[in-house]
Each structure stands twice: as C-alpha cells, then as structure tokens.
Amino acid sequence: MKAIVFHEHGPTSNLKYEDFPDPEIGAGDCLVKVKAVSLNGFEPMILGATTALRTPLPMIPGGDVAGEIVEVGAEVDGGQWKVGDRVSIYPMVPGEGMTGETRLGGCCEYVRIPATNMVRVPDDVTDVEAASLPIAYGTALRMMVTRGQVKEGEKVLILGATGGVGTCCVQLAKAAGAEVVACGSADWKLDKLKEIGADHVINTSEQDFRQAVWDLYGKPNMRGGGGVDMVINYIGGDTWVDGCKSLGPGGRMLTCGATAGYATDNDIRYIWTYELSLIGSNGWTMEDQAEIMRMVGDGRVKPALHAVRPLSETPMSIQELIDRKVFGKIVLEP
C-alpha cells in the first residue's frame, strides 16, 4: 500500500510517500480501507520527537481515521461488523497506545484495528466529517459537555480557539446557548471564528485577554458579577493566572492539556475568593465519539475544515501546523 512514512525523527522533509507493507490482521481485528484521515497537533511533536513518548520507527502519522471494512478477523462478531460497514476508529488501543504515536497511523491506504475500537459512521455523516472528529472533537465534547456541563446563558472564554479542539468548543458552547468569547492570534482566524458562531473575538497577539474580558463584562466582584462563567484553557503556561482572573464568582476553568507548559504560576487568592473550580478532562470515550458524530449528523455541529487534500500532501500539511497557518482540521484522502 501507499503510505506517508518517517524512518527518522526530524523535519517534515523526513516524511516520505512510499510503498509500505499491507497490515496483517489478527483474529479480533478488522482491516479498514482508509477513506479519510485528519491531522492533529501531536503530529509535529511525534515527528520531531519533542514528547516523552518512545515512538517505534518507521512510523506512519495520523490518528483520526474513517473508512470501510474490507476484511474481518475470524473471531469478530459477524452480527456486529461486516465487510462494507463504514467506521471511524477509536485510536487509543489497549496494549498498543495511540494510533499515529506508538502504533502505525492512518496516513495510508489500509489500517488494522481491533473490532472493539470501531465506531459506526451514520449515513448522514461523510467520511471527511467522520475523520475530523475523534481526537479533537471527542476531547472537546468531553471537556465542554460531560465535564464542564456548559449551560444556556453562560459566558464562555475559549483560549486558543482556532485549532480542532477550539473550533469544536465554540460550536458546542453555541449549541448550548452560551455567549462565546474566542481567542486567536491572527485576524483572518478571528474572522473565521465569527463565522462558526463566536460572539466576541480577542486577538491575543495584540490584546491582553483578561483585560478584554473585563472590558466586556466588568471586573469580577466578590459581591457578584463580572468576568465569565467558564474558561477553556488547554494552553497553560503564562495564561493560567489570567484565566483564573477572567472568571467571575463561582466560575470554572476547564483544561485538557497544556501546550505552552504545565508548570504554571498560580494565585490561590482568586480560587478561594471567588470560589472557583478547576476541572480536568482527560481525552474522550467511544461514547463521546459516537455522540459528537450524532451532533454532526443532525446539524448541531459542523467540523471546521481548513483543507481536504490528497494523502501525498501530508508533509506540506504538517508544516502548516508547525507554522500555525491552520484553522480547524486538515483532512487527507488516500
């Protein structure tokens, strides 16, 4: 099969479009013909070896896959799965790790996946849409809805809103009836945030987001009022304290990661004074993945797509992620 492969960590020039052995399935696996695969923020980190993960080489990138079953293992329940079924994969495989990180990814023509790691794709969801959803949109759903319980009428601040997780958070907040303040670092990205539902936008390369929130809603007051009800912060680093200072009384800050660093400063006074809640959210479940597909199918959420391209353009696409030139998701089609 054709695949995007890197044999050594390093720059995107290490990514090669080449022939690679077809996967061999086990008794409990299915062989899935890849119809679409999307990229995530971890692709440059795995390629560049900037994480603590030990990635076996050679490696195929791509964690989010949608496709069609072309072969089923001898022990797979034929009443549940059969050749021709449309599926997306749940990429965290017990004993193997994350697809595209510690097991071969989906930037190729065929993938092997345990039957227990497949989610059925509804007829009203396209392959491109289905491939956009698992990691970023599943994570956003768990953080915003399952853990954060966003509600109608709340004010929600979303930091780093222009990536896959952020664009979904904007839409989930709007679907719940919240007022959304979305942050980005380029005007063209802010325009797109407005297109997908943001009520207010903040250019963090020019504005202090905490002061911008105070200008919008007032400074938080111990007697009530001011600030926002929820802050979505998976950036960490030096945004953490200002995130807390942006919350009004009883507010909550949600985090599912820390792209700018996890060893943050803190100002505990704000936590006790305003009775703030700090809520963690770790990944997503298969049920979350199925639910976000249902939301796409009935029109409550529409994946924000930066581009849909042939698989051979994966290196250029990952370079765009590195250069921060992407809004939403890039999808590749073999």
Image: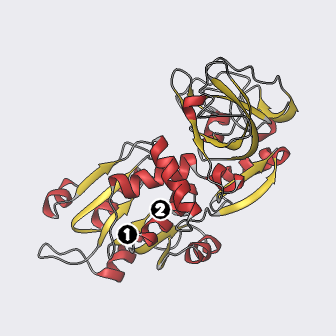
The quarter of the picture where residue 114 lies is: top right
Circles 1 and 2: CB atoms closer than 8 Å: yes
Q: Which residue is mark 2?
A: 169
Label 1 – label 2 distance at C-alpha: 10 Å
Picture coordinates of residue 315 (x, y %)? Answer: 78, 44
Q: Is residue 162 left or right of residue 270?
A: right
**Other residues around mark 2 within 10 Å, as few (<14) / some (14–19) / many (≥20):** many
The answer to whether residue 235 is seen in the rendering is no
Q: Nearer the viewer, residue 244 or 117?
A: 117
Q: Quadrant of the C terminus?
A: top right
- Looking at the rendered structure, which numbered label has been put on residue 270? none
Q: Is residue 286 left or right of residue 57?
A: left
In percent of the image, x 47 and y 70: which residue is there?
A: 182
In percent of the image, x 27 and y 60: which residue is there?
A: 252
In percent of the image, x 60 and y 32: which residue is there?
A: 79
The answer to whether residue 228 is seen in the rendering is yes
| Nearest to N terminus: mark 1 or mark 2 | 1
Picture coordinates of residue 181 (x, y %)? Answer: 43, 73
Q: Amino acid at mark 1?
A: Val
SS label for mark 1: strand
**Other residues around mark 1 within 10 Å, as few (<14) / some (14–19) / many (≥20):** many
Q: Which residue is mark 1?
A: 156
Q: Quadrant of the N terminus?
A: top right
SS label for mark 2: helix
Q: Nearer the viewer, residue 28 or 244?
A: 28
